Amino acid sequence: ASLSCKRVANIRNHLAAAVPSNDQILLLGPPYKVPKDNTLQSLEILSSLRLGDKEDEESMNNGGGGGRNSQESSNDASSQQPQTTQPQQRRILSTTERSGARRLFLFSKQALSENAPDPPPCILGPMDVMLPSEPPGSSPLNMTQSAVASQPLHQALAAYERQFMLYLCQGRVLADAADLRLQACKQCVQEQAVMARALRAAVSNLSDHFNGAARTRSEFTSLFQTKTSSHAMILQRFESTLASLGSIPLHPSLVAIARGSGRIMESLLDTVPVERERAWAQQCQTSHERLLTLFAELDTAFGNLGTPASREEETRQDLVAEDGIQQLSEEVQGDVQGIRDRQAQRLQRLTADHGKVLKIIMDAINAEVEEGKEDEVQKAFTPLRQISNDAKDIVPDMVTDDKLMKELMKKVADSKTEAMKRMKVRLREVSVAQSSIQRVLSSVGVLKAALTQQCDNMVHLEHVAELATSYRDFLSELRRRRAYGQAVTSNSAAMMERLAVMRSDEVKAREKFLRGPGRHLMPPFFEIFVPTLATPPPLFTPQ
């Protein structure tokens, strides 16, 4: 049911009065998701929930008409004005998401279980109405029993009053029943509307999970196919790869180095532990086939979750059910409301007729008693017969409409019974679909871990598959390094020659200084200021 939310410390505990906490499933939205406890305590969320309650109350009360008192008070005014076209009925399920209102729906896990009992049939009341056969109480006429008994005309007048009082009492019972049935029908239709909104919420949440599963399926399928196609190519070409490695000779210098180490290696295949790699390849082949089988099962499981076409068909059926609720709402606000209004108008007329009858009788008796006009009592029978003739069909017509209203009320009740049965089936379908999605996503996680392990295992075989290319790059790398060493040696020799020339020039320059101006310097210049002044330049000896 949709919940009217007040600010409470913990909404889950507050709802435990209806459904135990461990049996609750809550959906908050839109968009409809399972809320966290701290989300339910947010002031913003509580305000949006109150706004949703206000919208639902306005939707329920709109077009429903007032009570019988308001109907009766407006009859005089409406009778003086021309009839105008009634405003278009508001759609009971037309609430959009533009207002920012949110709703919280509560579901029971037990009610969604496979063995949950069918909901009890909906029965609205009152179904049967007991009409009085005798007017209750005493007559309001101011006549004693002796007077009535002594005057046959007075007895006839009293009989008229009692007859109209019986009509009035019967009419009041039928009008009261119409009021109760209208309210019961309106409440029942509103409950069906809430059920439809709850189903919308559940389907919306399922759609989010389905879309998430579809994205996961697409992403994982792309990854899986990329990896497994590469693995399949390596496994399929493994033996031919080994054969091609056997046809690639090792460089003679490498063969010589191997012989110097006591090993005989003449081809590239001799560097590979063939038997161990073959056993590993067989294990990888088995794992690869198992992965393909698991992926096929997973893909089938994804397919069993439903297709957009099947979901569209389910949505179409839900919309048909919602249209049925809307039509039922219009029928209640039209036919049932109309019957209730007619019953109220007839009751008003019976009340007025009873008042007229009382006035006619009292005026006639008073004229006889006070003025001695005995013929006034006789004259009173003419308007009384006229009023009686005019009113004789009112109660039968009310009884006829009462039967029709009872049929309409049963129709509303039967509609809710069928809606509850369909709701149980649909929610069970949603629950099963949710569980299936969770199982499939769990399988994706398991298969993703297995694929990761397979990728790690295939690394060894990738080494074998890429060995020929790596060997060519190895030889190229050795040639590059040899060229680098030769370039370094050549440049180093040229640099050493250049440094030797520079040192020779430096020695000559120092000797020239020492034999010239330097010979006039005092000893402190050689001993204290620049101790290396008379030494030759150092030799460059690279490590």
Image (cartoon, rainbow, N blue to C red):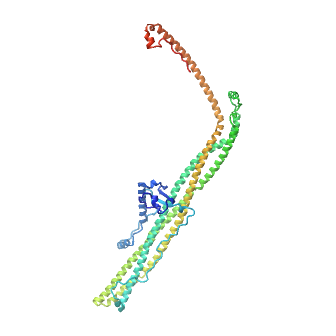
Return the residue nearer the eye: 484 or 446. 446
User: Is 531 above or below relative to 239?
Assistant: above
Residue at the extreme left of the image, as rendered: 371
Q: Quadrant of residue 236?
A: top right
Q: Which of 262 and 45 is in front in this view?
A: 262
Q: What residue is drawn where x is 63% and y is 51%?
A: 296
At horizontal 58% and vertical 51% (from top left) the residue drawn is: 442
Could you tell me residue 512's position as x and y percent?
48, 9
In this image, 303 relative to 333: left or right? right
Q: Is residue 180 visible?
A: yes
Residue 103 visible in rendering:
no
Above or below, 230 relative to 516? below
* Rendered location of residue 397, percent (x, y): 44, 78
Quadrant assignment, res 452: top right
Q: Where is 180 relative to 43, above or below? A: below
Rendered location of residue 41, percent (x, y):
43, 55
Q: Which residue lies furthest to the bottom in this view?
A: 150
Q: Position of residue 478 (x, y in %)?
A: 63, 28
Quadrant in which the C terminus is drawn: top right
